Image (spheres, rainbow, N blue to C red):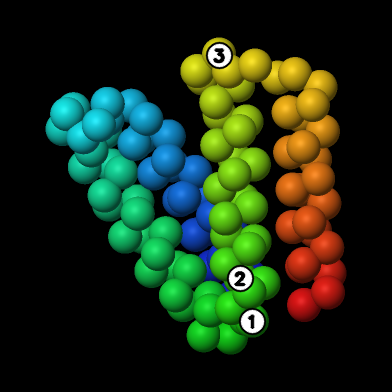
Amino acid sequence: MYWIYLVLAGVFEVVWATSMKYSEGFTKPLPSIITLVTMIISFGLLSVAMKHLPMGTAYAIWTGIGAVGAFILGILLMGEAATPLRVASMCLILAGIVGLKLSA
């Protein structure tokens, strides 16, 4: 169950990172509110997951999910480049996430 909390925390991290970009420096109210609310949810779920998962593993996986998710949404929603080196680098992060999960 705690792995599910951790994955959800990572998903909410992607949401808050994306909405933070759309908030334009917290100058737009709705994206700013979405950012703050999803930050609280993400950190709350992470803290629950860390009650039973190793801190280093939980934190690394949480940030990894956020990084991979933000990378994908950056390409899909914001027109960021999907160069071979960027994609290969993101695959290495994904491999690290899988490795941490398998070793936990």
Horizontally, is 75 left or right of 34 in the view? right
State the image coordinates of residue 81 (x, y, percent, origin top left).
Answer: 65, 16
State the image coordinates of residue 48 (x, y, percent, origin top left).
Answer: 46, 77
Q: Secondary structure at mark 2?
A: helix
Q: Which mark is residue 96?
A: none
Is residue 4 in sight in this rendering?
no
3D distance between C-alphas at marks 1 and 3: 36 Å
The crowd level at tag 2 (other Cα within 10 Å; few <14, some 14-19, many 20+) is: many
Q: Nearer the viewer, residue 98 or 82?
A: 82
Find residue 3 and report its image quarter.
Answer: bottom right
3D distance between C-alphas at marks 3 and 2: 30 Å
Is residue 58 in sight in this rendering?
yes
> How many numbered markers are drawn?
3
Residue kind at label 3, given as amino acid type: Gly
Query: What is the quadrant of the C terminus in the image?
Result: bottom right
| Residue ID for mark 3 | 79
Q: Please, is residue 40 above or below residue 52 in the view?
A: above
Q: Nearer the viewer, residue 37 or 60?
A: 60
Q: Secondary structure at mark 1?
A: loop
Asked if labels 2 and 1 touch by Cβ distance under 8 angstroms, the answer is: yes
Q: Nearer the viewer, residue 44 or 64?
A: 64
The crowd level at tag 1 (other Cα within 10 Å; few <14, some 14-19, many 20+) is: few
Q: Nearer the viewer, residue 11 or 54?
A: 54
| Residue ID for mark 1 | 54
Q: Secondary structure at mark 3?
A: loop
